[in-house]
Image (cartoon, rainbow, N blue to C red):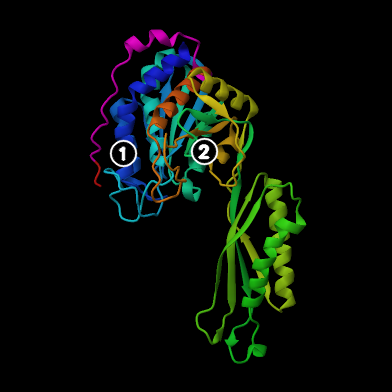
Amino acid sequence: MEGRTIRALAEDQRDYMVRFRRELHRHPEVAGEEVWTSGRIAAELEHLGIPFVVDERRNVIGRIRGARPGKRLALRADFDALPMTEATGLPYASEIPGVMHACGHDAHAAGLMGAAQLLWQLRDQLAGEVFLCFQIGEELGYGAPEIIRYLKEQGGVDFVAGIHLMPDWQPGTFICQSGPLMAGVAGWEITVTGKGGHGSAPWNAIDPIRPAAEILLRLGAIQGTRRSAFEQFVVSPCIFSAGTARNIIPDTALVSGTNRFFSARQQEELIAMMEQTAQQIAASYGARAELVQGPPTMAVVNDPAAAALAAQVVREIGGSVQQATPLLASDNMGDYLQTFPGIYVFAGSGPWEGERLPIHNAAYSPNEDALTWSAAFFTGLTLAVCGEGEQLSKAKGGMTDAAEPAESGFPV
C-alpha cells in the first residue's frame, strides 16, 4: 500500500517535472559553464521553500530536515549538457547552438526536483535529514569533490543515492545490483621527446614520431597479452599529435587517452606497465618518454546492503529489478560511493515502441514517464532510510497540488 501511494504521489508531480525538464532542455550548458542552470535550480528550490546553498563551483545543495533526528541521506543528480548539435526536432529542443542535453541530465535534475517537492511536503514524516545534491560538470569529472567536502563538513551522511536514466530499458525497470556498476576513468598523456631537424636528414635528428607510433600500438598489446583475459579494463589511446610541417622533424610527439578500470590497484598496475613500455620504446630510438596521469574518477561500486534496500524499494513502488553487465563508461558518482555507503541505479527511459537511440546521440530524448519513476524511487528510498513507517496512504489527502515551476528571472 505504501509503495503504491508513493507512485501515486509521484504521478501527481508528472506535469510539473515535465515542464521543468523541458525548460532545462531548452537552455543546456556544458560542464563548467552551468551559470543559468545552477541559478534556475536555486530559484526553483527557493520557490518551493527548501533551504539551499550554492557552492563556489555552482553546485546547488538543498537540505530538508525531518521532524526528528535520524539518518542522513544524500540524493544526487547532475545537470550539465554536451557540446553537440541537437537533432531531435522537438518543439522544446535546445535553443543554444552546439549544446544539447544528450545524456538525460536535464531529466535527472527534474526527477530529483520532483522528489524534492514531495519530500518537502512529507518532511514531518522524516526522521533525519536529506541533502538534495544538484551537481555540475559530471561529463568532465567536475562537481563531486566540492559536494563531498560539503557533506563531510556537515557531519557526513549515512547513505548516498543517485539515478542515471538509460534507454536500454523501459520506464519502471531498475538496475540496482551490488558491486561494480561502472568503471573508473583516468586520463593520461605520454610525451615523447626527441630532437628536431630537417626531414631530409633524419640522422641529424631524433625523430619522436616513430617511437610514439610504436608506443600507441604497443599499448593495445597490454590488454591482449599482459593482463588476464578475465579482467575488465580498457586502455584507449584517442589522440596522436606531432609535427607542424611536412619537412620538419618535430621535437616532441604526444599520445593521449584514457584508462577504464574497476579498482585503484588495477589502474596503478596499468599505469606502471604503460610507463615502462613507453620509456623502453623511446629509449630504443634515443628519445625520452614521460607519462602524466590526470586525477582519476573512481569506479561506481554499490554497497550490497544499499543495493538490497534499493531493490526492495523498487518492488514496493511497482517497478521491476533486473541485472546488467557492468559498463566501462564512467561517472563520478563513484567518488561519492568511495566516501559514503550507497547505491547508483540505472532506470529505464527507453520508448515504449520504436528505436532506442543511445545516450550521447544527437537525436536522443528520454521517455518522460521515467521522471515519475525517478521521483518515486528517490521518495521511497528516503522514507526507507529516514522514515518511521508511517502510513503514506494518509498523506495523500494532505498533499498540495504540484507547484508551477517558478519564473526563473535569469537571462537566457
Q: Name the one closer to the observer, 397 or 386.
A: 397
Q: Residues within 10 Å of mark 1 (few under 14, many from 20)?
A: some
Residue closest to the eye, 398 or 36: 398
In the rendered view, would you say 315 is above or below 233?
above
Quarter of the image where one finds residue 51: top left
Q: Is residue 114 magenta?
A: no
Tell me if residue 403 is in the magenta stretch: yes
Regarding mark 2 in the picture, which secondary structure is present there? helix
SS label for mark 1: helix
Name the amino acid type tagged 1: Arg
**Of tags 2 and 1, which is closer to the observer?**
1
Please state the horizontal and vertical placement of residue 336, each as a whole percent of the image: 55, 37
Quarter assignment of residue 403: top left
Mark 2 touching mark 1, by CB under 8 A? no
To which residue does mark 2 refer? Answer: 149
Percent position (x, y) of residue 257? 58, 60
Residue at 38% from the left image edge and 46% from the top image edge: 101
Left or right for 405, reference 10:
left
Question: Which residue position holds label 1?
Answer: 22
Q: Residue at x 39, y 16 (%)?
A: 122
Residue 283 sits above or below residue 166 on the image: below
Vertical relation: 37 (above or below) 275 = above
Label 2 vs label 1: CA separation? 31 Å
| Residue 156 appears in the figure | no
Q: How many marks?
A: 2
Residues rendered magenta in the picture: 385-409
Q: Is residue 250 visible?
A: yes
Q: Is residue 162 left or right of residue 89?
A: right
Magenta stretch prevailing secondary structure? loop
Residue at the image position 33 percent from the left and 21 percent from the top: 12
Type of amino acid under label 2: Arg
> Which of pointers 2 and 1 lies earlier in the amino acid sequence?
1
